[in-house]
Amino acid sequence: MKALLLAATAVLAFCGSAYADTIKVGVVGPFSGPFAIQGKNFKAGIDAYMALNGSKVGADDIEIIYRDVPTPDPAQAKALAQELVVKEGVQYLTGFYFTPDAMAVTPLLEQANVPLVIMNAATSAIVTKSPLVVRTSFTLWQTSAPMAKVASERGIKKVITVVSDYGPGVDSETAFKKTFEAAGGTVVESIRMPLSTNDFSPIMQRVKDSGAATVFAFLPSGPTTLGFVKAYNENGLKEAGIQFLAPGDLTQESDLPALGDAAIGLTTTFHYAVSHVSPENKTFVEAARKAIGNPAELSFPAVGAYDGMHVIYKMIEATGGKQDAQKAVDAVKGLAWESPRGPVSIDAESRHITQNIYLREVAKAEDGTYYNKEIATFEKQTDPGLAASK
Amino acid sequence: MQTIFSVAVDALAYGMVLFVISIGLSVTMGLMRVVNLAHGAFAMIGGYIASYAASDLGLGYGVAMLIAVIGTIVIAVPIERLLYRRIYGAPELTQVLMTIGITFCVIGIANYVFGPTLKTIPLPDTLRGPVDLGFRSIAAHRLFAIACGAVVAVALWFLLERTPFGVKVRATVDNAAMAASLGVRTRIIYAVSFAVAVGLAAFGGIVGAELLPIEPYYALRYMVTFLVVVSVGGAGSIPGALLACLVLGGIDTTGRYLVPEYGEFFFYLAVIAIVWIFPHGLLGRAK
């Protein structure tokens, strides 16, 4: 009996390999907890891509396996990535909302023979940690530096910067400061606030006292952004004509209904607005809204995920479904395509996405909803952060 | 000089918002001796109901607030009967485990029902926008929060110190068996005190929503701050909680104005110093 069972299992196993393979893709992201909405956007982007392009590449089925890291937790991210590679046998790792999580996984890639496609984590240095990393999101340098150009073009001379005191905040501050000072402007003061700040009135008082007519701010999206923008309005800074500039994280589409009228006129630079006008974006938004359920929740991580899936599909095509990380990464170097955010390509040197950065202003649509209205385009922006750190 | 006034007004406003939200917890911890880590969850439920009533049903701010406070109490009373009643007088660890469990359940339900996005409670026009104080402008709803804090402090002090109900509450807390044998219906006293505490939590959640916006993680995000206020003020002491909020609000706001890069260093330094010198809180009674 035992022998019979063994034989049966053996036959089954052989049958399995004779047919087309299932290629597994492991996604690590925040799917529960305070950042669950970002994970939801990852999933919506992936679902939208697979709904539009099918769940097969050639004869191979694609299977997505999700793993949850609710808050930045490098040790947990690494453990889950290891589990995905060893136990689930994934050929591709992707997702990653937070920089520390992505950083923790880079040392595994070579030995596991697995490429890592980053769908969000936005610190410049990650791509230098392993030659098997490709990124389809943005960096804070990429989105903040154009804002400094806008400021100097508008004839602004003095700016005060206010950022949350953590990696991306500091990146954003440095990017703005360097670019703005190179263009001849002065940053009169740079304030770094703790992440847990709830009451921003004293900060607004500092901004007023600094004498600068423009404030450049960066905070992570969510409750703090809401408090910050409200404090800007209520402490009379908006009335006093102090301009508010920021990267687009602050006016993320899912936060706009809560920000309401307070956000109107905020000027931001970013790589993607849900309202972007193009046929590609129309198709994408339709599919992604269907996948996410509530249309108001759709925002930028979804497009990072959508393009991430595009890169992975191209990798699978190039390797014919065989596991060969280096070949897969080489195949997408220089790959160019039309993304929902506009024309993009993977820079062959840095493996980071080259894309348009848009200058936007928050406006009210006719139906009473708020959106980021694109008013100018900076074409084909690479990541200036890597060059700056060399 | 103008800056000093300005920072002082900010400190007062922040302190009063903290007071309105935390005072309910001071009641449950000090008078009912329950370490109620679900306090933030009840404040959040109040905020969600008010937000739903005001923005989805289009009701006025005052009506929405009333519905939210009553609604939260209606939700809380069965929870008190079924769950809290079992942990009165239980060891603190048991209370912490059960109430933190309730908190996680509420977070999950809120996330499922209302989604992970931020919710706001639309303010009436009179509370919207800045008010000119002569030397600076301040948000009208901040002044409203200061007024609410003052009213709550006086009303609660009167209820507990000057009414027959207050006498029964204090008697029940000090010795439930003796109070019961003197004819005090302790179960009802507990239920009513709990309802008052939950109602205050909901009220605080609504009044404070401009500063601490409503989202599913509200229930945990600000819990540490609430607990700090109660332990610094002395559990169960209303003047203590008020004093704690004003002192901590003042230190936090001034610190953030002068040296924002130190973050909450001065806030927690003050907490350590106060608790070291006054182990039972500023105005707490020794057990």
Image (tube, coloured by chain):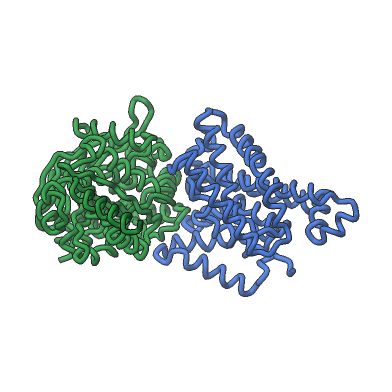
Chain colours: A green, B blue
Residue B203 at what x, y percent from top left?
A: 61, 44
Residue A184 at what x, y percent from top left?
A: 17, 55
Front one among B122 and B188 = B188
Residue A332 at what x, y percent from top left?
A: 12, 50
Residue A168 in view in this figure: no
Front one among A241 and A147 = A147
The part of the image, by quadrant, that contains residue B62 is: top right
Front one among A288 and A386 = A288
Q: Is residue A210 above or below residue A48?
A: below
Residue at 62%, 48% (x, y): give it.
B201
Residue at 53%, 34% (x, y): give it.
B52
Q: Determine the residue located farthest toward the bottom in the rendered image.
A: B277
Q: Is residue B71 left or right of residue A232?
A: right
Q: Is residue A389 above or below residue A259?
A: below
Q: Determine the residue located farthest toward the right in the rendered image.
A: B182
Residue at 38%, 49% (x, y): give it.
A31
Q: Is residue B83 above or below residue A387?
A: above
Q: Number of marks in the image?
A: 0
Q: Determine the residue located farthest toward the front in the rendered image.
A: A1
Residue A275 at what x, y percent from top left?
A: 27, 34
Q: Is residue B58 left or right of residue B260?
A: right
Q: Determine the residue located farthest toward the top in the rendered image.
A: A366
The part of the image, by quadrant, that contains residue B70 is: top right
Q: Is residue B197 above or below residue A123?
A: above
Q: Is residue A187 left or right of residue A353?
A: right
Q: Is residue A242 left or right of residue B54?
A: left
Front one among A21 and A372 = A21
Q: Split into 4 quadrants, where in the image is the C terminus of chain B?
A: bottom right
Residue B284 in view in this figure: yes
